[in-house]
Image: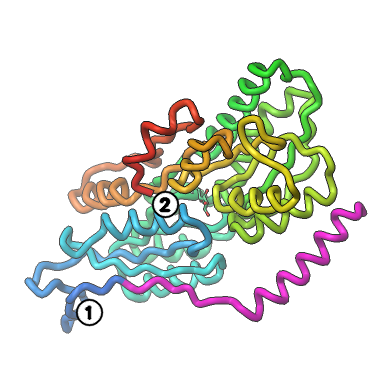
């Protein structure tokens, strides 16, 4: 076993022990408009119009993106629009999401919105929701369950995001006449088994595998967080003396990686020691793209609330809905980012 892996195991053990001591509650404040529960158990607005009750199981609050995604859904499903939204923060645990879904079933909500932390492990609870006659709308990530177990999915194309990252690297190396030089790449992966991580990994690898001179030295779980991204990047820097490219599967891990790189006395971005390819395109990261410190940011759009609102309205009217809705996404570099920064909503 390589020294790098031994170090990582020791660090992981320490992190697990520490996390057990400081795990925060991090629960979102439930959105509870001035509503009253009537004798029949239904929840009504004060004006006696019946509210559409939505139970939302959110993964957690691990990243700027996640917070923007939560805000988007809470902004769209408001009391003024006839909703009673209950938001649960699962704090990165599938078991907490399953408990929340079961609670929503017992509360006889009208709809369940689920952002599934990983693709697998949902069949049983989704069958329970179907038996209770409660439509499930998947948001952000997807599941490997049979598609009959959920009504629709609103999210982003992570496979395409991964491909876009590799295509950008291809073009960048061509511009520098380095396409066929040896390139050392390390990857900061998101939550293993999440559709976001799986898609980005598969998309990038599908193109990277065509280049025998692109050497992926390592790929470790950075948990989509700044702290873990920094920890893993520091390990990479101690193990691999000549890293050319970091592929970081979200901006929060990128921020941590850039801290570790700077502490190692190295630079990033255009003309820097290490090329940074990031995902999400949150405002803070796009500013670093504008400064040339992040080379490219592959957008993953968290603004999914309006799509979910439209789907629920269609279902309320008995209209058909699509099985999947993909939100629009872009790729940002120093060449195009300035025109979008001012209007950025997240
Ligand atoms: O990239 C990351 C968040 O599921 C696409 O999860 C989402 C990912 C996003 O923690 O910032």
**Color theme of the render:** rainbow
Residue found at x 17% / y 58%: 81
Q: Earlier in the sequence, mark 1 or mark 2?
A: 1
Q: Is residue 20 left or right of residue 214?
A: left
Element on which disc 1 rests? loop
Indicate yes or no whether the magenta region holds residue 2: yes
Residue found at x 52% / y 69%: 91
Q: Residues within 10 Å of mark 2 (few under 14, many from 20)?
A: many
Of helix, strand and loop, which mostly describes the magenta segment? helix
Mark number, residue 139 = 2
Q: Residues within 10 Å of mark 1 (few under 14, many from 20)?
A: few
Element on which disc 2 rests? strand
Q: Which residues are magenta?
A: 1-30
Q: Is residue 262 left or right of residue 42?
A: right
Measured as percent of width and height from the top left, residue 63 is found at 51, 57
Residue found at x 82% / y 38%: 242
């Amino acid at each position: 076993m390589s020294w790098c892996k031994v170090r990582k195991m020791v660090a992981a053990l320490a992190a697990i022990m520490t996390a057990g001591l400081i795990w925060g509650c991090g629960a979102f404040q439930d959105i509870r408009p001035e509503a009253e529960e009537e004798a029949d158990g239904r929840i009504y607005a004060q004006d006696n119009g019946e509210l559409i009750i939505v139970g939302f199981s959110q993964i957690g609050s691990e990243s700027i993106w996640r917070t923007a995604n939560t805000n988007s859904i809470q902004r769209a499903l408001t009391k003024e629009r006839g909703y009673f939204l209950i938001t649960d923060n699962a704090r990165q645990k599938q078991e907490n999401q399953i408990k929340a879904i079961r609670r929503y079933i017992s509360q006889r909500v009208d709809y369940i919105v689920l952002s599934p932390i990983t693709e697998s492990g949902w069949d049983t609870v989704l069958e329970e929701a179907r038996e209770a006659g409660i439509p499930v709308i998947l948001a952000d990530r997807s599941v490997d369950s049979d598609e009959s177990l959920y009504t629709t999915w609103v999210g982003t194309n992570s496979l395409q995001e991964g491909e876009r990252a590799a295509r950008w690297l291809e073009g960048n190396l061509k511009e520098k006449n380095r396409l066929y030089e040896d390139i050392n790449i390390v990857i900061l992966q998101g939550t293993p088994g999440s559709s976001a991580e799986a898609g980005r990994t598969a998309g990038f690898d599908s193109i990277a595998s065509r280049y025998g001179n692109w050497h992926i030295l390592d790929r470790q779980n950075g948990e989509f967080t700044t702290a873990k991204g920094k920890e893993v990047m520091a390990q990479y820097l101690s193990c691999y003396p000549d890293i050319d490219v970091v592929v970081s599967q979200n901006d929060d891990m990128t921020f941590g990686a850039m801290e570790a790189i700077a502490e190692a006395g190295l630079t990033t971005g255009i003309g820097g020691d290490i090329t940074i390819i990031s995902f999400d395109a949150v405002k803070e990261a796009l500013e670093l793209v504008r400064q040339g410190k992040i080379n490219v940011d592959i957008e993953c759009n968290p603004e999914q609330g309006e799509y979910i609102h439209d789907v629920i309205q269609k279902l309320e009217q008995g209209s058909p809905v699509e099985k999947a809705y993909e939100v629009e996404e872009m790729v940002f570099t120093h060449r195009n980012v300035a025109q979008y920064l001012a209007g950025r909503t997240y």
